[in-house]
Image (tube, rainbow, N blue to C red):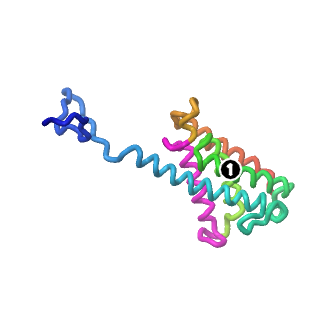
Amino acid sequence: MPSTSPSTTAPTTATVLPGRVAPEPALTSPHAYDAGLLLLRLALGLTMAAHGSQKLFGWFGGGGLDGTGQFFTMSGYPAGDAMAVVAGLTETFGGLALAVGLLTPLAAAAILGTMVNALAVTWGGGFFAPKGSEYELLLTAGAAALALTGPGRYAVDRFLPVLRAHRLAYGAAAVVVGLVTAGVILLLRK
Protein backbone atom coordinates (compact mmCIF):
# COMPACT_ATOMS: atom_id res chain seq x y z
CA MET A 1 0.00 0.00 0.00
CA PRO A 2 1.50 3.39 -0.96
CA SER A 3 2.27 5.92 1.77
CA THR A 4 0.17 9.08 1.95
CA SER A 5 2.75 11.08 3.90
CA PRO A 6 5.11 13.39 2.02
CA SER A 7 8.61 12.14 1.44
CA THR A 8 11.31 13.58 3.70
CA THR A 9 14.20 12.63 1.46
CA ALA A 10 15.39 14.51 -1.57
CA PRO A 11 15.01 12.84 -4.94
CA THR A 12 18.09 10.97 -6.09
CA THR A 13 18.06 12.57 -9.52
CA ALA A 14 17.40 16.14 -10.45
CA THR A 15 16.56 17.72 -13.75
CA VAL A 16 19.28 20.22 -14.58
CA LEU A 17 19.06 22.52 -17.54
CA PRO A 18 22.13 22.66 -19.82
CA GLY A 19 24.69 25.16 -18.57
CA ARG A 20 23.32 25.19 -15.01
CA VAL A 21 24.71 23.58 -11.88
CA ALA A 22 22.44 21.43 -9.76
CA PRO A 23 21.87 22.87 -6.28
CA GLU A 24 23.44 20.95 -3.46
CA PRO A 25 21.09 19.51 -0.84
CA ALA A 26 21.01 21.27 2.52
CA LEU A 27 23.44 19.55 4.86
CA THR A 28 22.27 21.21 8.07
CA SER A 29 18.83 22.00 9.31
CA PRO A 30 18.11 25.75 9.62
CA HIS A 31 16.82 24.92 13.10
CA ALA A 32 20.36 23.91 14.09
CA TYR A 33 21.58 27.44 13.35
CA ASP A 34 18.65 28.94 15.23
CA ALA A 35 19.30 26.72 18.25
CA GLY A 36 22.98 27.72 18.20
CA LEU A 37 22.10 31.42 18.02
CA LEU A 38 19.64 30.98 20.89
CA LEU A 39 22.35 29.35 23.02
CA LEU A 40 24.83 32.12 22.19
CA ARG A 41 22.23 34.83 22.93
CA LEU A 42 21.31 33.27 26.27
CA ALA A 43 24.91 32.77 27.40
CA LEU A 44 26.10 36.21 26.35
CA GLY A 45 22.94 38.08 27.32
CA LEU A 46 22.52 36.55 30.77
CA THR A 47 26.23 36.94 31.50
CA MET A 48 26.03 40.64 30.65
CA ALA A 49 22.79 41.08 32.64
CA ALA A 50 24.50 39.52 35.66
CA HIS A 51 27.46 41.90 35.27
CA GLY A 52 25.07 44.84 35.03
CA SER A 53 23.29 43.77 38.22
CA GLN A 54 26.68 43.66 39.95
CA LYS A 55 27.15 47.31 39.03
CA LEU A 56 23.61 48.48 39.78
CA PHE A 57 22.69 46.45 42.87
CA GLY A 58 25.90 44.88 44.16
CA TRP A 59 24.51 41.41 43.41
CA PHE A 60 26.80 38.42 42.78
CA GLY A 61 29.64 40.03 44.74
CA GLY A 62 29.59 43.27 42.76
CA GLY A 63 30.52 46.69 44.02
CA GLY A 64 27.13 48.31 43.51
CA LEU A 65 26.92 51.86 42.24
CA ASP A 66 29.38 53.26 44.80
CA GLY A 67 32.11 50.69 44.25
CA THR A 68 31.64 50.68 40.48
CA GLY A 69 31.64 54.49 40.41
CA GLN A 70 34.97 54.51 42.27
CA PHE A 71 36.35 51.98 39.78
CA PHE A 72 35.30 54.16 36.83
CA THR A 73 36.88 57.22 38.45
CA MET A 74 40.14 55.31 39.09
CA SER A 75 40.07 54.11 35.46
CA GLY A 76 40.05 57.70 34.20
CA TYR A 77 36.38 58.20 33.37
CA PRO A 78 34.75 61.49 34.38
CA ALA A 79 31.69 61.33 36.65
CA GLY A 80 32.35 57.79 37.82
CA ASP A 81 28.96 57.41 39.50
CA ALA A 82 27.11 58.43 36.33
CA MET A 83 29.25 56.07 34.28
CA ALA A 84 28.43 53.26 36.70
CA VAL A 85 24.70 53.86 36.18
CA VAL A 86 25.10 53.99 32.39
CA ALA A 87 27.23 50.84 32.28
CA GLY A 88 24.96 48.99 34.70
CA LEU A 89 21.78 49.85 32.80
CA THR A 90 23.39 49.10 29.44
CA GLU A 91 24.68 45.71 30.55
CA THR A 92 21.50 44.72 32.42
CA PHE A 93 18.90 45.75 29.86
CA GLY A 94 21.09 45.12 26.82
CA GLY A 95 21.89 41.66 28.14
CA LEU A 96 18.25 40.81 28.89
CA ALA A 97 17.13 42.08 25.46
CA LEU A 98 19.86 40.03 23.80
CA ALA A 99 18.87 36.92 25.74
CA VAL A 100 15.24 37.06 24.58
CA GLY A 101 16.12 38.38 21.11
CA LEU A 102 14.42 41.76 21.45
CA LEU A 103 15.78 44.50 19.18
CA THR A 104 18.81 42.26 18.77
CA PRO A 105 20.99 44.57 16.65
CA LEU A 106 20.58 47.43 19.15
CA ALA A 107 21.03 45.16 22.18
CA ALA A 108 24.20 43.77 20.63
CA ALA A 109 25.41 47.31 19.87
CA ALA A 110 24.90 48.25 23.54
CA ILE A 111 26.95 45.26 24.68
CA LEU A 112 29.57 45.91 22.01
CA GLY A 113 30.05 49.53 23.05
CA THR A 114 30.32 48.64 26.72
CA MET A 115 32.79 45.85 26.03
CA VAL A 116 35.01 48.03 23.84
CA ASN A 117 35.39 50.30 26.87
CA ALA A 118 36.10 47.28 29.07
CA LEU A 119 38.78 46.23 26.58
CA ALA A 120 40.35 49.67 26.81
CA VAL A 121 40.57 49.32 30.60
CA THR A 122 42.06 45.80 30.56
CA TRP A 123 44.31 46.34 27.54
CA GLY A 124 47.98 46.12 28.38
CA GLY A 125 47.55 43.45 31.05
CA GLY A 126 48.35 40.66 28.58
CA PHE A 127 45.89 38.39 26.86
CA PHE A 128 45.08 35.80 29.50
CA ALA A 129 43.03 36.19 32.67
CA PRO A 130 43.08 37.32 35.41
CA LYS A 131 44.61 40.62 34.23
CA GLY A 132 44.31 40.10 30.49
CA SER A 133 41.60 40.97 28.02
CA GLU A 134 40.61 37.56 26.64
CA TYR A 135 37.22 37.55 28.39
CA GLU A 136 36.30 41.05 27.24
CA LEU A 137 37.47 40.29 23.70
CA LEU A 138 35.31 37.15 23.55
CA LEU A 139 32.21 39.04 24.77
CA THR A 140 32.89 41.86 22.28
CA ALA A 141 33.23 39.42 19.38
CA GLY A 142 30.10 37.54 20.45
CA ALA A 143 28.06 40.74 20.53
CA ALA A 144 29.33 41.80 17.10
CA ALA A 145 28.59 38.34 15.70
CA LEU A 146 25.01 38.44 17.00
CA ALA A 147 24.51 41.94 15.60
CA LEU A 148 25.62 40.72 12.17
CA THR A 149 23.82 37.35 12.11
CA GLY A 150 20.61 38.37 13.83
CA PRO A 151 18.83 36.48 16.58
CA GLY A 152 17.59 33.44 14.68
CA ARG A 153 14.02 32.12 14.68
CA TYR A 154 13.67 31.65 18.43
CA ALA A 155 13.50 35.34 19.31
CA VAL A 156 11.00 38.08 20.09
CA ASP A 157 12.25 39.94 17.00
CA ARG A 158 10.43 37.37 14.84
CA PHE A 159 7.17 39.01 15.98
CA LEU A 160 8.29 42.55 15.06
CA PRO A 161 7.50 43.35 11.41
CA VAL A 162 10.59 45.46 10.74
CA LEU A 163 13.03 42.99 12.34
CA ARG A 164 11.29 39.74 11.36
CA ALA A 165 13.74 39.27 8.49
CA HIS A 166 17.18 40.31 9.73
CA ARG A 167 19.30 42.18 7.23
CA LEU A 168 23.07 42.39 7.25
CA ALA A 169 22.70 46.17 6.91
CA TYR A 170 20.89 46.30 10.29
CA GLY A 171 23.71 44.40 11.93
CA ALA A 172 26.47 46.39 10.28
CA ALA A 173 24.77 49.67 11.25
CA ALA A 174 24.43 48.42 14.83
CA VAL A 175 28.14 47.52 14.97
CA VAL A 176 29.02 51.01 13.70
CA VAL A 177 26.71 52.62 16.31
CA GLY A 178 28.29 50.55 19.08
CA LEU A 179 31.83 51.39 17.98
CA VAL A 180 31.14 55.12 17.52
CA THR A 181 29.43 55.36 20.91
CA ALA A 182 32.32 53.50 22.55
CA GLY A 183 34.77 55.84 20.82
CA VAL A 184 32.97 58.93 22.11
CA ILE A 185 33.03 57.59 25.68
CA LEU A 186 36.72 56.68 25.33
CA LEU A 187 37.48 60.24 24.22
CA LEU A 188 36.14 61.42 27.59
CA ARG A 189 38.50 59.09 29.44
CA LYS A 190 41.72 60.58 30.81
Q: Quadrant of the C terminus?
A: bottom right
Name which residue lies at 63% across and 65% down. Answer: 133
Up/down of 130 relative to 64, above or below: below
Q: Nearer the viewer, residue 179 or 86?
A: 86
* Magenta-colored span: 126-155
**Residue most toward the bottom?**
130
Where residue 171 sits: x, y (%)? Answer: 57, 40
Q: Nearer the viewer, residue 15 or 120?
A: 15
Name which residue lies at 61% across and 53% down. Answer: 45
Q: 163 left or right of 59?
A: left
Up/down of 160 relative to 134, above or below: above
Q: Which residue is mark 1?
A: 113
Name which residue lies at 41% across and 49% down. Answer: 32
Where residue 122 sits: x, y (%)? Answer: 69, 65
110 drawn magenta:
no
Q: Quadrant of residue 137?
A: bottom right
Where residue 176 sits: x, y (%)? Answer: 63, 42
Q: Quadrant of the N terminus?
A: top left
Q: 127 left or right of 59?
A: left
Is residue 186 among the parts visible in the rendering? Answer: no
